[in-house]
Image (cartoon, helix red, strand yellow):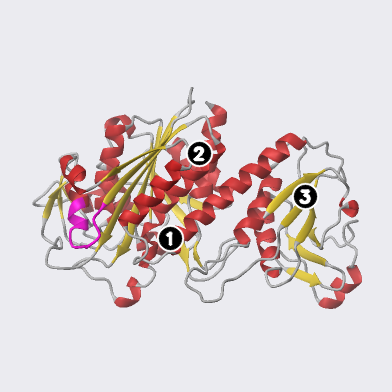
Amino acid sequence: MNFELTINPIDKIESDIEIIVISQKNLDHRFVKDRELLEKSGFKSSQDETCLLIEKDRLYVGIDSISSVNMRTAIASAIRTLKSTPYKSIKIASYMNHPKCTAVIRAIVEGFILGAYSFDKYKSEKSELSIENIIISLEDYNEYKLDIEKCAIAMNNGQIVAEATNFTRDIVNTTPEDCYPKIMADIAQTLANQSEMECTILKPKELKKEKMETLLAVARASRHKPRVIHLTHKPKDAKAVVTLVGKGLTYDSGGLSLKPSDFMVTMKSDKSGGSAVLGIMKAVSEMNLPVEVHGFVGAVENMIGGDAYKPDDVLVAKNGKTIEIRNTDAEGRLVLADTLCYAQQEVKADYIFDMATLTGASVVGVGHYTSSIMGNSDKVKDKIIKSAKISGEFATKLDFNRYLKKSLNSEIADICNISNTRYGGAITAGQFLEEFIDDDHKDKWAHIDIAGPAFVEHSWGENPHGASGAGVRLIMRVIEGVAKKQ
């Protein structure tokens, strides 16, 4: 898709079809040209509801109110409606709700790109979107004097972040036979080769040297050897340093604590955190933000076999802590433990965020669509929550407490890899990870459990069936905010 901004009035722009947004059910707005037809069709102009008038070459879409969150999902719904049509060009007004805020412009662009996404790698017949050009009018219909340069930046940033989100979706949706640790490392290396990023890949010998024994234990029953990926965006005169750590379980069988067969389906999605880190690094590099960003991915496959690690084993993490294994399906936290330790050894950061499809308990607690945010600093957690709202992602805080932490106590090791209670599993998983955060980063760290939104088997909002690319837009907004405020 090609996007173009123009100051020409919407009526003076030539295109195959016009998208008209109806806010607050207002059919009296001057953009609405087909009130009688809309009323006859039964169109209620509810949020994300569409009405395609083929004979008029106009598509109407409803929106509760003009905001970036509402606009993003409405435009995604609109482009889905047009997927099977032959239209090649679209025109749309800017629908600004503030003279200096360009968030709606960005949301329109993101909505088009995110809503148009489809994953057809394994289909014999590929889906083709005929839409090639989208023209956004900055006509001064609402008495706002818009800064076209700022609008262009918003449009460009929206395109970069949305395409990085789709890039992430592609990785997550790819099957475990086609995307294993080496492939994730190859993707990272390709990103580095196409940009000015640096890329370091740790293979088993280097991992052994780094004493990353918990990660190696999870990986050892798989024919695919593990990798730890380190991508670096290092601009001159960086305003801050941000470290990202992602869980990259390219497939999770549960190990010897084998998952039921129904729960193994969709486990290709267990690499969502690591995939999001790759997507974010792509966007950071393309946007060339003045923030030093380090992306670490622990890429591992958790399988069964004679060499599998076992319940009752005691493993030694990179920081020297011993871990009693009571469930080999609580493997992501073991991979993250060593990767977090390695990341902190390599980089002293102002912020450190880890992302992982870590617990089913998070999905039970907050639902399919919401990420759980944990950590020691309310300031850091609030920064993530605020960025989530701007980006259109859902996130909520889960507070640590000392009573739940006691459920991780082990009689034979420093800590157990699962709690002794079935309740509060998302929080105890976060508290387990806290054990591998050093004193310098205790109040700079947040854990983001994306198990709910990362992979959902139906479309929702601007997200398709399957991978959503959860975390990419959220963290990009955090990093953009850091770049502006430092």
Spatial CA distance of label 1 from label 2 is 21 Å
Residue 388 placed where, x, y %?
A: 54, 47
As drawn, the label of residue 285 is 2
Task: Indicate left or right for 108 with 368 as reference.
Answer: right
Q: Local crowd at mark 1 within 10 Å, few (<14), some, or many (≥20)? A: many
In terms of depth relative to the viewer, which is nearer, 228 or 107? 228
Residue 155, picture quadrant: top right
Q: Main secondary structure of the magenta part?
A: loop
Residue 428 placed where, x, y %?
A: 29, 52
Dot 3 corresponds to which residue?
A: 136
**What residue is shown at x 44% (from left), y 42% (from top)?**
193
Please state which of the two labelled residues, at mark 2 or mark 3, is closer to the viewer: 2
Dot 1 corresponds to which residue?
A: 172
Given the image, on which type of amino acid does mark 1 rest? Val
**What residue is shown at x 75% (from left), y 47% (from top)?**
4
Query: Residue 428: within the magenta?
Result: no
